[in-house]
């Protein structure tokens, strides 16, 4: 009798290790576009845990998302049947019961200011390399919890999402104020390749990778131009990076057994939207919603800043970060876009494969 109860308890707790519909877990790596609170606990001024950040989040909480509401991490999680992004690893690292329950459906390691290169961690960010070390520890925890085969099975199906590179590019650009060199694009490509290989060695198989957006078109960069145009030199970086990673990922997927990926050309997505904005989506493409000064891009977004009213009509929330409305469109395209925007398959197909 008591062993029957034990079996029931074990199988019930095993059930709770998968998401509601048996959806794969989601592990997120990257920078401020998808940081949902990692930086709150760091010694840095690069945080978004004060109003008006979060003004459109449930209960208007400033969670640390660099957005007026949900971020791309949340919309992505919703595609996997979650309510919003899995929590920031650092926020729950010391709560072992919670961490044990949570890690089977995913964690968010992203930290605002993180770059692809090992020495790119603007303002004390957790670098991508360190984020992957944290994931390595979680792999050990998963193995302790589920056994080796169980952990492998879980990671086999998990979606690993990586959004990084813009910080490396911005720092390089501001050092030289010129288009990227071939060596620089190669070093970013090699860094991404190393990260993917390391994650693969820990059992990750399915990678959702976002290229870098048209960072020369963010309000902060437009404000530096007399007529508010995009910075063409800065925009060369994401294009050159994207061209470098397409063949790298193709090669990697034939080299590494079972490795699958979906690469989003977010540069092209952004330029395409700027040229053909949807009347029902954001139509203010240049000005930031929060801040002040030229294009609302010159003053800090903080309690004293003016905030626009029709926030869903703004492509940018602050001088650097997309609005909730823009993030939703971006994820929709990554998830269900055609090969014009996502290659070789979209996230939906990536999720559905085995
Ligand atoms: C966890 O707790 C230890 C001991 O109090 C502390 O040193 C460490 O910084 C904490 N880690 C996190 C991520 O909060
Ligand atoms: C995860 O593993 C680390 C290192 O082995 C350990 O210190 C920590 O307590 C584990 N956490 C949980 C939630 O099991
Ligand atoms: C503004 O941007 C346009 C288009 O890239 C460029 O031709 C022009 O030289 C820029 N002006 C300044 C002052 O940078
Ligand atoms: C991809 O593989 C081809 C054929 O082996 C090779 O010529 C090319 O240099 C590789 N490219 C990258 C970026 O690894
Ligand atoms: C993980 O997936 C690979 C195929 O990529 C398969 O060979 C392996 O058996 C799977 N492992 C588990 C535990 O499901
Ligand atoms: C997904 O994309 C296809 C092809 O572009 C389109 O027909 C379909 O309506 C889209 N589905 C959703 C849910 O947006």
Image: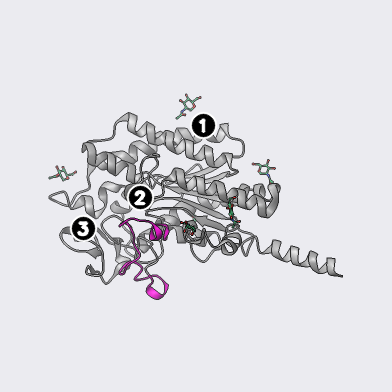
Name the residue nearer the viewer: 23 or 89.
89
Relative to 223, 352 lies left or right: right
Could you tell me what secondary structure mostly forms the magenta stretch? loop
Q: Horizontal and vertical percent for residue 230? A: 22, 48
Element on which disc 1 rests: helix
Residue 297 shows which numbered tag? 3
Label 1 CB-ligand 4 distance < 8 A = yes
Q: Horizontal and vertical percent for residue 222? A: 20, 51
Asked which quadrant contains residue 128, the reply is top left
Q: Is residue 56 magenta?
A: yes
Q: Is residue 40 visible?
A: yes
Can you name the residue that lies furthest to the left here? Answer: 226
Depth check, mark 3 against mark 1: the one in front is 3
Ligand 5 in which quarter: top right
The residue stretch that appears in magenta: 36-61
Which residue is disc 1 drawn over? 251
Name the residue nearer the viewer: 88 or 312.
88
Please report the residue visible at 26 percent of the width from the left and 47 percent of the height from the top: 216
Please report the residue visible at 30 percent of the width from the left and 62 percent of the height from the top: 317
Could you give the CA–CA distance between mark 1 and mark 2, rounded to whole angstroms?
33 Å
Which residue is disc 2 drawn over? 124
């Amino acid at each position: 009798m008591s062993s029957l109860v034990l079996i029931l308890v074990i199988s019930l707790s095993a059930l709770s290790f998968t998401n509601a519909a048996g959806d794969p877990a989601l592990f997120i790596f990257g920078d401020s576009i998808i940081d949902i609170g990692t930086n709150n606990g760091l010694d840095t001024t690069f945080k978004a845990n004060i109003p008006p950040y979060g003004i459109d989040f449930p209960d208007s909480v400033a969670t640390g998302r660099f957005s007026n509401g949900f971020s791309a991490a949340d919309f992505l999680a919703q595609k996997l049947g979650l309510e919003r992004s899995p929590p920031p690893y650092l926020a729950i690292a010391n709560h072992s019961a919670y961490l044990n329950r949570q890690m089977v459906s995913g964690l968010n390691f992203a930290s605002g200011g993180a770059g692809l290169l090992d020495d790119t961690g603007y303002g004390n960010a957790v670098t991508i390399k360190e984020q992957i070390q944290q994931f390595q520890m979680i792999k050990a925890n998963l193995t302790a919890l589920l056994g080796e085969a169980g952990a492998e099975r879980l990671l086999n199906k998990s979606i690993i999402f990586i959004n990084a590179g813009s910080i490396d590019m911005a720092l390089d650009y501001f050092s030289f104020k010129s288009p990227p060199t071939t060596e620089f694009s190669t070093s970013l490509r090699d860094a991404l390749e190393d990260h993917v290989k390391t994650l693969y060695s820990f059992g990750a198989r399915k990678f959702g990778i976002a290229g870098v957006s048209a960072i020369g078109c963010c309000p902060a960069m437009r404000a530096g131009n007399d007529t508010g145009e995009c910075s063409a030199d800065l925009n060369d970086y994401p294009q050159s990076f994207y061209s470098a990673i397409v063949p790298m990922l193709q090669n990697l997927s034939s080299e590494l057994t079972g490795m699958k990926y979906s690469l989003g050309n977010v540069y092209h997505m952004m330029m395409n939207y700027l040229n053909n904005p949807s009347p029902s989506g954001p139509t203010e493409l240049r000005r930031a919603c929060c801040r002040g000064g030229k294009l609302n891009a010159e003053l800090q977004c903080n309690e004293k800043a003016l905030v626009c009213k029709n926030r869903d009509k703004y492509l940018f929330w602050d001088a650097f970060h997309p609005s909730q409305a823009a993030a939703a469109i971006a994820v929709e395209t990554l998830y269900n876009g055609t090969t014009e925007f996502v290659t070789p398959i979209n996230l939906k197909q990536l999720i559905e494969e085995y």
